Image (tube, rainbow, N blue to C red):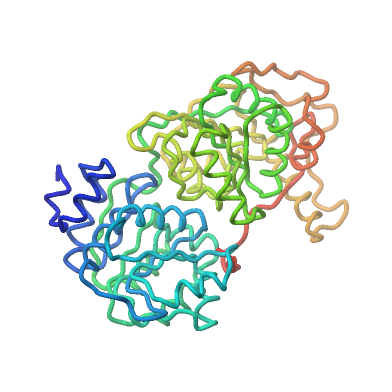
Amino acid sequence: MTDFSMLGLFPGLLKALARMGLETPTPIQARAIPSVMEGRDLLGLAQTGTGKTLAFGLPIVHALQDAGRPDPKSARALILAPTRELVNQIAEALTVLTNGMQTSVVKVVGGASLNRQTDRLARGCDILVATPGRLIDLLERRAVTLDKVQMLVLDEADQMLDLGFIHALRKIVGFLPAKRQTLLFSATMPKQMNEIAEAYLDRPIKVQVAPPGKAADKVEQAVHFIPQGDKAKLLESYLLEHREEAALVFSRTKHGAEKLYRLLEKWGFAVGSIHGNKSQSQRERTLAAFRSGELKVLVATDVAARGLDIPLVRHVYNLDLPNVPENYIHRIGRTARAGRDGRAVAFCAPAEMADLRAIEALTKVGIPVIGGAPWGNQEADAARAAARQAQNQKRGGGRPGANKAGPKAGSKPARTGAAGGAKKKTGGKPGLHPAYAQEFGGDKRGRPGGGNRGRKAGGARRDG
């Protein structure tokens, strides 16, 4: 498929695509759109940044071109996504696509006024884009009905499962008509995803354009072994090398993301942060400033950054390795988008060696080392045990003095590399700012002080 005109889309859509400067469909678009236009259910597996939004957006708009005015409080197509940012991004793309058409697009997310969303839904809409938690709020208020939905899209479905939205999803499906077309898009295919597909899809067409666990081809990956307490200064040295290029930095926790943001701001970087503790308006303003180039560095958590399409991101830094290996693929997929090159550097502390091994097992590729040396098993295991103990005590679930583990007294300080202008630490203080050390708790041996390991499935966020 070499041209959108070969897909059978109505002329108004082809004009809209030309206006957007799009001529050639991506592989997921070329393979998915014809099947969706035939009315088939679809299971689409593709890594992030491959054009999934238009893969379902184009056939939806095509199907609704002559649908007429929607009934009050109703929607004809429902698109569910796990995060506010992804909902905003999908709604924005569809709004641009349908500019000048009769097709109406409404988004509902947590952090925004329920009354305003209720008023907007009162008129009905063609396409409703929503986070699960906020949609349930509106359903319970009887502000929207789903009995007219003809097409259901579950986007980034694996992330919905990670965030514990499975119960919310089941509840929402109960409001939908049994006769509908369902499209499920995911970057990975965990076991539970098969169960979702079997439950909600009817004889689906499966489209897979990249194997699960495969990173974008043009991402240059690297790992730097560094004690936890030295990570901030090493990040500074990397950022100073490309101060005018956009960089995305991932922290595992909301608290850690905010601490790092404040530290980098103090060091003079044009930086912002997005995470679950930020209001919707704050997140939107920060993302707009990052997209425009006003901000050069964005510190984010996995949830806040999932699905973001910011083509100019050149560098991704995994300050904390994710404890879910699939999230590594999503993180580094924020760069090397739309055919561009990109670089992703992971910072690995002793307690993160198991996370690194899990990532390499998933991707089936050894990540090149550009600084430091891999931590030995004894040191890594001791640091991980110390992190678990600190985490348990922080949550009130640990007993003082229990599960003691750590490097033997008198052991040598941990090694660290010197790439990117960072000096090798052979002793003494690591030079970490106190505001940052309070969150990451690194000592001279790089032993982390614990932190939130992530929300378990089943505890869905109500605000999306």
On-image quarter of the C terminus: bottom right
Q: Is residue 401 above or below residue 223?
A: below
Give the number of marks: 0
Residue placed most toward the observer, 250 or 230: 250
Instruction: Identify the residue shown where x is 55% and y is 34%.
Output: 294
Left or right: 238, with 169 as reference point: right
On-image quarter of the N terminus: top left
Dividing the picture into quarters, in which one does residue 157 lie?
Answer: bottom left
Dividing the picture into quarters, in which one does residue 112 lie?
Answer: bottom right
Q: Is residue 72 above or below residue 20?
A: below
Instruction: Identify the residue shown where x is 68% and y is 41%.
Output: 381
Residue projecting furthest to the front: 100
Residue placed most toward the observer, 46 or 175: 175
Where residue 133 sits in the image (x, y, percent)? 54, 69
Dividing the picture into quarters, in which one does residue 269 lie?
Answer: top right
Residue placed most toward the observer, 112 or 440: 112
Where residue 442 sits in the image (x, y, percent)? 76, 35
Where residue 98 sits in the image (x, y, percent)? 30, 57
Left or right: 227, with 4 as reference point: right
Residue projecting furthest to the right: 400
Instruction: Identify the residue shown where x is 80% and y is 20%.
Output: 427
Where residue 195 sits in the image (x, y, percent)? 39, 69
Residue placed most toward the observer, 262 or 409: 262
Q: Is residue 109 above or below residue 1?
A: below
